[in-house]
Image: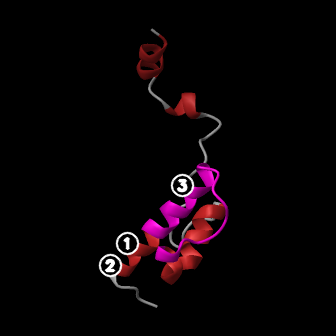
């Protein structure tokens, strides 16, 4: 289902405000302003990624081997 760009932005903001409310120690209650996008607000509060959000890729165990040796040496100085 396609969602208008403006709605996508409001959903993203609802998610961010929910996430911030959790960080601020506020209760898990959707403010009246966000009732239209309550699901996104609650997902943000609960730390659930938004749909379509890319998951972070794990760092390879052999990261140093993948880097240029001079870049590793530069960081240690």
Q: Residue at x 46, y 75 (%)?
A: 33
Q: Nearer the viewer, residue 51 or 74?
A: 51
Q: Residue furthest top?
A: 77
Q: Can the viewer see residue 35 in this picture?
A: yes
Q: Which residue is mark 3?
A: 20
Residue 77 location (% of width, % of height): 45, 8
Q: Are marks 1 and 2 in contact (CB under 8 Å)?
A: yes
Q: Residue at x 32, y 79 (%)?
A: 5
Q: Which residue is mark 1?
A: 9
Mark number displayed over residue 67: none
Q: Are marks 3 and 1 in contact (CB under 8 Å)?
A: no
Q: Nearer the viewer, mark 3 or mark 1?
A: 3
Please say whether residue 77 is one of the residues in the magenta stretch: no
In the image, the segment drawn in magenta is: 13-33
Q: Main secondary structure of the magenta part?
A: helix
Secondary structure, mark 1, is: helix
Q: Nearer the viewer, mark 3 or mark 2?
A: 3
Please, is residue 22 above or below residue 67 in the view?
Answer: below
Q: CA distance from mark 3 to mark 2?
A: 21 Å
In-image side of 52 versus 5 (left or right)? right
Question: Which numbered disc, 3 or 2, marks the residue that appears first in the sequence?
Answer: 2
Q: Can the viewer see residue 53 in this picture?
A: no
Q: Residue furthest bottom?
A: 1
Q: Which residue is mark 2?
A: 6
Please, is residue 15 above or below residue 75 in the view?
Answer: below
Secondary structure, mark 2, is: helix
Callout 2 crowding tier (Cα within 10 Å): few <14, some 14–19, many ≥20: few
Q: Residue at x 43, y 66 (%)?
A: 13
């Amino acid at each position: 289902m396609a969602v208008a760009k403006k709605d996508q932005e409001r959903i993203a903001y609802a998610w961010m405000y929910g996430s911030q409310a959790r960080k601020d120690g506020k209760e898990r209650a959707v403010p009246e302003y966000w009732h239209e996008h309550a699901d996104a607000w609650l997902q943000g509060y609960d730390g659930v990624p938004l749909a379509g959000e890319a998951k972070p890729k794990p760092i390879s165990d052999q990261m140093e081997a993948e880097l240029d040796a001079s870049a590793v040496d530069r960081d240690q100085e």
